[in-house]
Image (tube, helix red, strand yellow):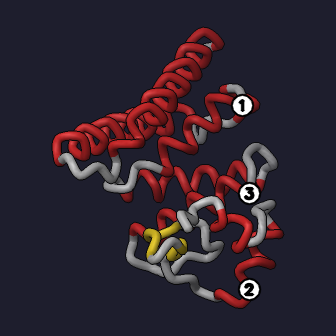
Amino acid sequence: MAHDIAALAAELTAMATADHRSAVHANSEDPAEQLAWRRLTARHGDRLGEIMNEHGWPTAELFGEEAARAAWLIAQHADRQLDVQRRALRLMGQAVSEGAAGPRELAFLSDRTLVNEGRRQIYGTQIAGVKDGAPVPWPCEEPERMDALRAEVGIEPFDTYVAGFSTA
């Protein structure tokens, strides 16, 4: 079993590396590059689903910190596979409640899933785009409580966060 987990951890890490390399194509003007990105994230989402079927959420305790982070990134980018995102969210939520995963990453995945469902996000982690040099977040459920909710899960204040997206 330990060898199996080590191999899966290496596989998750390799998928995250491929994701990072290809992410620049997610919003490419070249349809072929966008399609390649979509295929990659779909393959990764499918594989994460298989791993979750067999092992539950890939926690740092079982898979190692790097592989656990990779699993989160793969779930985060499974935008066209809401079933995978929802399962990852549920399993990761259980892991967070048991102290086996971080609430910060769960907040990001929660917002991403909500946005993909066409709903308002909670923590303001998902940016819809940049207009006139300023980041435009997807709508939030309670914008007035957003920074307090972000602080509870270890996310910097919204203004600090979005400053990294600004092109002005």
- Quadrant where the N terminus lies? top right
Tell me which label, 1 or 3, sits earlier in the chain. Answer: 1
For this orientation, the residue located farthest to the top is 3
Residue 140 in which image quadrant: bottom right
Name the residue beneath numbered marker 3.
103
93, 67: nearer the viewer: 67
Name the residue beneath numbered marker 1.
65
Q: Looking at the picture, how far across and down is residue 154, in whole percent?
A: 80, 60
Tell me which label, 2 or 1, sits earlier in the chain. Answer: 1
Q: Nearer the viewer, mark 2 or mark 3?
A: 2
Q: Nearer the viewer, mark 2 or mark 1?
A: 2
**What kind of residue is marked 3?**
Pro
Tell me which label, 2 or 3, sits earlier in the chain. Answer: 3
Q: Looking at the picture, how far across and down is residue 45, in whole percent?
A: 39, 41
Name the residue beneath numbered marker 2.
145
Mark pair 2, 3: CA separation: 17 Å
Circle 2/circle 3 CB separation < 8 Å = no
Label 2 crowd (10 A; few <14 / some 14-19 / many >=20): few
For this orientation, the residue located farthest to the front is 168
